[in-house]
Amino acid sequence: MHLRRWPELPASGIILQIIRTVQPSDRADELSLLRRIINDPDRPISPADRHIAGKLPSGIQYIWERHTEGSSIAVIAEAGKSATELEKAREWIESFPGDAVRASKIYLAHNDEAAADMMHAMPFTQGEIVSSRLIGGVRFWSDFRIHSQGYGCVLVAANSCGSDMLSRIVQQLQELGNYRNMALLALPLVREQWLELDKVERQRRLFAAEVSDPATKDDALLEKVSSLSLELANLSNCISYRLDATKAYAELVNERLEGLQPEIIEGTLSLRGFTKRRFLPAVRTCAAHHDRLQRLSGRAANMTALLRARIETRIENQNARLLKSMESRAKAQLRLQQVVEGLSIFALTYYSIGLLSYILHGAEEVVHLPHSGLLLAIAVPFVMLGIWLAIHRIKKRILGQS
């Protein structure tokens, strides 16, 4: 942080600063513009540089800083510089690539009396002037509105503050405004997505009603919940980084505000009051959008789990019905098998008795056997019993082995 400190500021003069968001493809053009001004062979500019300070040919100081999302460039002119020199410096800093987030003109005065003399030339809107006494006795005035050439105006009275401390205070005051504007970059996206989240919320309610309807097909429900989850994921991917950045910038704004220790001046709106009224509601809106997006994503996940439970329940019921059907068929097959088994006993008995009758008729040719028909009749139950026992013994052995 010490490497990024501004140089000592003159007690009277003007500062022009522009902060931009810069795409990676524009970084080469940005360095090219810096190389046109800086002709120092002992200090070549490299893409790794993040802070460069020096003087323009006219003697006006400049400060360029590279940030994560963009860059800021400022020129510092002491009182007495010609309008032509100041105009050339302004044109130079406006020629840099990127989208301007904030452009400021800071007018420096020796004290409150000198600032009062300059006040009539300031384009402030009466009734909207914000003014506070800052640490070190410094006082500032601004209406935080955009004026001619797209610049906002700030008037600073140094009073008894030394040049080194004045430099730190003005830098912190500018950082407060810059971080405030960077934090608010998410607000247009939030307003745009808020209507889309309303649409997603309605779709979620309709989907919940369809899930509770047993007649709705699971394939259609799965397609709808997948589409809803994908839409929420796309919305989150589009804005999550911006919302996280807003949270981080808001914390920096609060840190800078506490560091400046603004005091209330009767008759004007204070810096702390202006920040609470105009900045914090926007930050809360972004935080509310982030929370709503997280809740909807969680509810979509719950609906997916509910649909999965519904599908699993149906599959389990189908499996149960299938097992019950298989059990019924197995019982029927068992009964049929028992019937066949009984019939087979009779069939085997019939054929066994037939064979026995051939044996007895053959034996009568050799040995006289009276009442062979009676013997066959007596043998029938014994043969049937033997066949039944043999079949059950074989079944027992086979089932025992399996």
Image (spheres, helix red, strand yellow):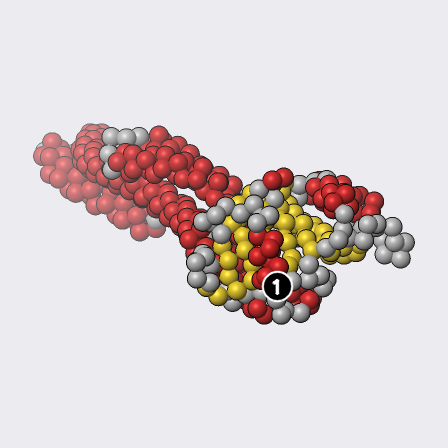
Of residues 397 and 311, the one drawn nearer to the viewer in this rendering: 311
- Find residue 227 and report its image quarter: top left
Q: Residue at x 41, y 36 (%)?
A: 196
286 versus 234 height, above or below: below
Image location (x, y in percent) of residue 96: 72, 42
Q: Which quarter of the rendered picture does the N terminus lie within? A: bottom right
Q: Position of residue 167 (x, y in %)?
A: 66, 63
- Please give left or right for residue 118 compared with residue 207 in the image: right
Horizontal side of residue 216 vs 181, given as left or right: left
Dot 1 falls on a residue whose secondary structure is loop
398 or 298, which is in the foreground? Answer: 298
Give the residue pinned by disc 1: 111
Identify the amino acid type marked 1: Asn
Residue at (53% x, 47% y) in the render: 124
Label 1: few (<14), some (14–19) or many (≥20) C-alpha neighbours in 10 Å: some
- Confirm whether residue 193 shows in the render: yes
**Residue 221, quarter of the rendered image:** top left
